[in-house]
């Protein structure tokens, strides 16, 4: 069972644990409680496990969106941070959008007090509590040959993982993981993998790059992909949309996905979550006359008719309001790449055929590091010796996305190196123990600055049970034992060269390891790329590595910033993107494996980076919210700034607001998060009143 309930150890209450995702959430109670397992069928929404307990109140540790419904599912209130509500005696269903999705059923009075983050029931009563893990496993495996027709048949079945074909499919929790795909001697799919019939199909010439580019759209629309001489999207009702436009077939498929997805996000506010959405307001103001959209009518249409109505609105009218996409993946159109498609589609990634630029060389990538070295003659690099590795560097074209991934030959600069082994390792991840295990290894006495900087960072969050261990000057056998041990994260500080990790008695080459228990890692040494890939091959899921020599001072800065961001719940790729701007050597770092992996949960919701500038006596605040595996593209966020009651889509920059000093201090006190304050990266808890 992925969800566990237990009594809190240091405070009264019930602790909810998602053992696979390493998430936990404490609901405090005025007195000790005894959670008792109950049937989960009483909840309207799916839950993995449920308990009942008797209490008069529950107090939340963080500020999260709260929705209150009656037993029929009708929304009675969505409680924003600036308000509290009181409801008379009745039967209520309460949804808590915390790091673990939770649902309550309670009979009695209900008061939600935002000042104390407390749900009060008046008197002691029975509360049913259900929880659902965000962890998704594929329902089965499709076997294909290396033919393009088989790839089309497999992609046509990806929609079997959708939990709805209504506009609510834009919520990540209602999009399941597509079945995995593996190469074999004949096409074979389990009988129970059946895609919903939507009357939509995508016809394409037999070109593998077209099929791969169509995969996320086919999944999202639950569309069949079939051979055809003319690239087009058609419906059984006779609607046709040509794909062979001036943009090219692949880019037109991408535009369709962005367009339909965004309109679903707006249209779904007529359904289960009728909230005030910022993007809908902006679009309704922008669209008028010929293109005015009646979302209430659109919501009730069959999916194929709704699709036709969406595509009557020009893409260019809505493009300025689109959320920033989470992931653009550059996928080599080879038969082997089909095995990676389900994992990319699970992220709703844009899939492009790579435009291969081989202008970068190892020496060009090291220019920044050499410049910094020349400015400080006392500096040293983290390479143990001259590097002989001859990597072939590739530069993916720029993309409007939070992350980019490269699938194919070559070492990418500025993008994740995605491998099938990383995603398979993630699927096979086993349930964790109660603690989040973090190991720091410092194998060089000259690099103690970084070790000292991060010593107080990992495990600094009181609400999470960290187990942090620090090792110094390990031998090859000792380091091998550390790498084989089941661990959530390894932060390695030391010298690395072509021969491997420099240890007290020689070098450990990760290519010689058959089994690695580390989930994620930061190898903060020179040219650690190949060693990082070897850790992925042996069982790891994702990590941050270097492409060339790195200057020690720059590595210390990058390592310290990454430690703080990773400890705060940022995924590997996002943490690196932010950290790159903090040191001149940032361009030497890349992610290998699954860049969406996070080693801890954010305090509440999706991780964010705040920008604060003082202007004419007020403070201009903007918030960039990053999608994660849990809060994927399509999630909503409500920034708790001032009296804001408006939701925004997670992925992009929340609209700027001018607020007072008092409002800013209140916002900064909600939790500890990164803030770019007057151009400097800080953390909210470190910003003092006098600085404002």
Image (tube, rainbow, N blue to C red):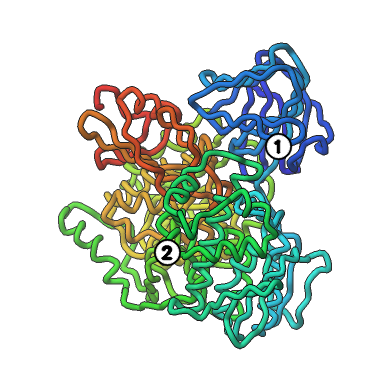
Q: Is residue 510 above or below residue 674?
A: below
Q: Is residue 456 left or right of residue 176?
A: left
Q: Is residue 590 visible?
A: yes
Residue displayed at 78% across by 30% down: 51
Q: Considering the numbered disc 1 on the image, is that residue within a helix, a strand or a loop?
A: strand
Q: Which residue is mark 2?
A: 316
Of 449 and 273, the residue lying toward us? 273
Mark 1 vs mark 2: in front: 2
Which quadrant is the N terminus positioned in?
A: top right
Quadrant hosting residue 7:
top right
Q: Residue at x 64, y 64 (%)?
A: 221
First in sequence: mark 1 vs mark 2: 1
Q: Residue at x 46, y 38 (%)?
A: 458
Viewer-proximal residue among 310 and 356: 310
Mark 2: few, some, or many residues within 10 Å (few <14, many ≥20)? few
In the image, residue 668 sits, relative to residue 90, either above or below, namely: below
Q: Number of labelled discs?
A: 2
Query: Where's residue 527, x and y in %?
Result: 38, 64
Residue furthest out toward the front: 289
Under tag 2, what secondary structure?
helix
Question: Mark 1 sits on what residue?
Answer: 131
Which x, y percent locates residue 21? 63, 45
* Residue ID at (29%, 36%): 620
Establish if 67 lies above or below 393.
above
Q: Quadrant of the C terminus?
A: top left
């Amino acid at each position: 069972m992925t969800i566990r309930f237990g009594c809190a150890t240091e405070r009264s209450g019930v602790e909810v644990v998602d053992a696979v995702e390493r998430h936990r959430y404490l609901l405090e109670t005025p007195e000790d409680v005894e959670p008792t397992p109950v049937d989960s069928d009483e909840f309207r929404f799916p839950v993995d496990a449920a308990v009942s307990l008797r209490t008069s109140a529950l107090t939340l540790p963080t500020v999260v969106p709260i929705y209150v419904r009656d037993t029929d599912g009708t929304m009675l209130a969505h409680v924003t941070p600036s308000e509290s509500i009181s409801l008379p005696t009745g039967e209520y269903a309460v949804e808590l959008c915390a790091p673990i999705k939770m649902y309550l059923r309670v009979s009695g009075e209900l008061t939600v007090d935002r000042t104390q983050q407390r749900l009060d029931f008046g008197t002691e009563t029975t509360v049913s509590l259900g929880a659902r893990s965000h962890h998704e496993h594929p329902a089965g495996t499709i076997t294909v040959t290396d033919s393009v027709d088989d790839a089309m048949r497999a992609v046509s079945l990806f929609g079997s993982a959708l939990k709805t074909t209504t506009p609510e499919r834009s919520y990540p929790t209602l999009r399941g993981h597509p079945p995995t795909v593996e190469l074999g001697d004949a096409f074979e799919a389990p009988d129970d993998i059946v895609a919903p019939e939507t009357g939509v199909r995508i016809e394409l010439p037999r070109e593998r790059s077209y099929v791969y580019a169509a995969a996320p759209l086919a999944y999202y629309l639950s569309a069949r992909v079939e051979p055809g001489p003319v690239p087009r999207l058609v419906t059984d009702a006779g609607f046709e949309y040509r794909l062979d436009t001036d943009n090219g077939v692949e880019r037109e498929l991408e535009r369709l996905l962005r367009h339909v997805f965004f309109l679903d996000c707006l249209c779904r506010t007529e359904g289960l979550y009728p909230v005030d959405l910022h993007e809908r307001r902006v679009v309704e103001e922008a669209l008028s006359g010929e293109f005015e959209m009646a979302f209430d009518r659109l919501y009730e249409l069959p999916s194929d008719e709704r699709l036709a109505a969406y595509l009557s609105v020009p893409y260019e009218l809505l493009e300025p309001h689109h959320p920033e996409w989470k992931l653009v993946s550059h996928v080599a159109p080879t038969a082997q790449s089909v095995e990676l498609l389900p994992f990319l589609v699970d992220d709703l990634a844009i899939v492009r055929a790579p435009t291969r630029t081989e202008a970068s060389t190892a020496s060009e990538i090291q220019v920044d590091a050499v410049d910094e070295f020349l400015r400080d003659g006392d500096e040293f690099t983290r390479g143990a010796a001259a590097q002989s590795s001859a990597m072939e560097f590739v530069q993916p074209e720029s993309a409007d996305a939070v992350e980019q991934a490269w699938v194919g030959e070559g070492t990418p600069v500025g993008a994740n190196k995605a491998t099938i082994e990383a995603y398979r390792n993630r699927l096979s991840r086993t349930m964790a123990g109660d603690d989040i295990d973090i190991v720091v290894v410092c194998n060089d006495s000259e690099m103690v600055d970084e070790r000292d900087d991060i010593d107080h960072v990992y495990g600094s969050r009181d609400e999470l049970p960290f187990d942090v261990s620090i090792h110094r000057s390990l031998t090859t056998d000792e380091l091998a034992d550390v790498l084989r041990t089941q661990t959530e994260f390894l932060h390695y500080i030391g010298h690395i060269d072509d021969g491997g990790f420099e240890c007290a008695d020689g070098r450990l080459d990760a290519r010689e390891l058959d089994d690695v228990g580390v989930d994620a890692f930061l190898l903060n040494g020179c040219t650690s790329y190949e060693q990082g890939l070897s850790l992925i091959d042996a069982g790891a899921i994702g990590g941050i590595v270097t492409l060339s020599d790195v200057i020690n001072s720059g590595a210390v800065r990058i390592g310290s910033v990454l430690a703080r961001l990773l400890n705060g719940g940022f995924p590997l790729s996002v943490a690196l993107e932010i950290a790159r701007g903090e040191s001149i050597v940032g361009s030497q770092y890349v992610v290998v494996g699954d860049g969406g992996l996070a080693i801890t949960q954010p305090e509440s919701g999706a991780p964010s980076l705040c920008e604060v500038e003082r202007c004419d006596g007020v403070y201009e605040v903007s918030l960039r919210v990053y999608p994660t595996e849990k809060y994927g593209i399509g999630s909503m966020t409500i920034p708790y700034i001032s009296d804001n009651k408006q939701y925004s889509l997670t992925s992009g920059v929340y609209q700027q607001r001018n607020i007072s000093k008092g409002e800013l201090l209140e916002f900064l006190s909600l939790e500890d998060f990164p803030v770019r304050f007057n151009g400097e990266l800080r953390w909210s808890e470190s910003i003092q009143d006098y600085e404002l």
